[in-house]
Image (cartoon, grey):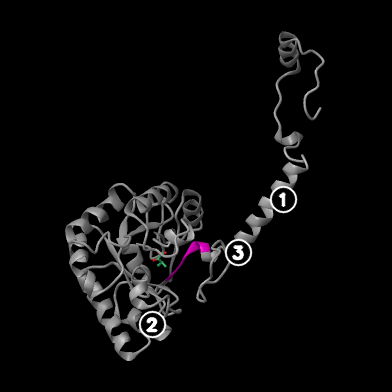
Amino acid sequence: MSATTSSERRTTTLDLRQKKERGLPITWLTAYDYPTALAIDRAGLDGILVGDSLGMVVLGYATTLPVTMDEMIHHCKAVARGAHRAFLVGDMPFLSYQVSPAEAVRNAGRFLQEGGMDAVKLEGGETILPALRAILAAGIPVMGHLGLTPQSIHQLGGYRMQGKTAAAARRLIDDALLLERSGCFSIVLESIPARLADLVSRRLAIPTIGIGAGAGCDGQVLVTHDLLGLFDRFTPKFAKKYADLRGEMARAFSQYREDVERRSFPAAEHTAEMPDAEWQTLLDDLGESGAATRGS
Ligand code: KIV
């Protein structure tokens, strides 16, 4: 079997594992809607995460905490309609897996059954073990998420790098090994020191996907709105901006407003007409023969 994922079929967890074994970087982005999923899929990326970053970059919440299961499922469905090759992961939102293992399984199941996802992602290490075990026992693949876990933002005291002390780094390594032993197929490492991410990646057989964790991870993920320059509040230091779509949108919207105000849009090429004979018959019917129309 080829180590590069086939363009004819859906990428699997096995493909991702094989990429790691062969030292091939795994490519991942977030998406929340159909056109973005379609474009990412066509660009040949390995995976798409419908992240709960949705709450901040699409829905305008201050944090990811208000995001609901229904909001996640709505956007997962749109992404699943657009992506036919990339492996699809749905992010379990705050309180969808922390209350009880039974609720966690029911919610994780919705991502596959209703949302069209292939797997789910959960934030945390040892503390999420009961939920993780229950979801895996139901046959649902799970991606872990360690380091900066935005659902614990108030506990962490802000969006700050994690694992900077030897003790914190040791806890993160132990959590990563525990997630692997428990059955996660991959782990996102967010905002941790590069050498720690590199060490974790070498100690694990499952692939690590880094965001703000340096080049030593087995793959990389970015929030697509950061990459495209679409998020208005901030661009994290670790994100590379590949486009300025917010600037492009502002330019296009202003140009459109000016065109409409100057009546230069719609022009002849954007306009359809009925045949002259039909028009004349209508005017005769209405007794309006010879009346001028606006713009004529
Ligand atoms: O919600 C999200 O987009 C994420 C990524 C930052 C990994 O969890």
Residue drawn 75% across and 10% down?
A: 287
Secondary structure, mark 3, is loop
* Tags 1 and 2 touching, CB below 8 Å: no
Q: Is residue 139 visible?
A: no
Q: Which mark is residue 206?
A: none
Seen in the picture, residue 90 relative to 199 is either above or below; the reply is above
Q: What residue would you read off at disc 2?
A: 198
At 41% from the left edge and 84% from the top edge, which residue is drawn? 193
Give the Cα separation between the discs numbered 1 and 3.
Answer: 20 Å
Where are the magenta residues, as a range?
A: 220-225
Q: Quadrant of the C terminus?
A: top right
The residue identified by callout 1 is 255
Marks 1, 2: nearer the viewer: 1
Residue where numbered disc 3 is placed: 243
Res. 34 visible in picture: yes
In this orientation, which residue lies closer to the viewer: 162 or 31?
162
For marks 1 and 2 on the same chain, the one whose residue lies earlier in the sequence: 2
Q: Position of residue 83 (x, y in %)?
A: 43, 51
Labels 3 & 2 near each other (Cβ < 8 A): no
Identify which amino acid the numbered label 1 is placed on: Gln
What's the distance in space between the residues labelled 1 and 2, CA to CA?
A: 47 Å
Q: Earlier in the sequence, mark 1 or mark 3?
A: 3
Which of these two is toward me, 68 or 221?
A: 68
- Horizontal and vertical percent for residue 180? 25, 73
Q: Nearer the viewer, residue 46 or 88?
A: 88
Q: Looking at the image, in which quadrant does ligand 1 appear? A: bottom left
Residue depicted at 71% across the width and 14% down the height = 278
Q: Residue at x 39, y 63 (%)?
A: 64
- The quarter holding residue 26 reads bottom left
Q: Residues within 10 Å of mark 3 (few under 14, many from 20)?
A: some
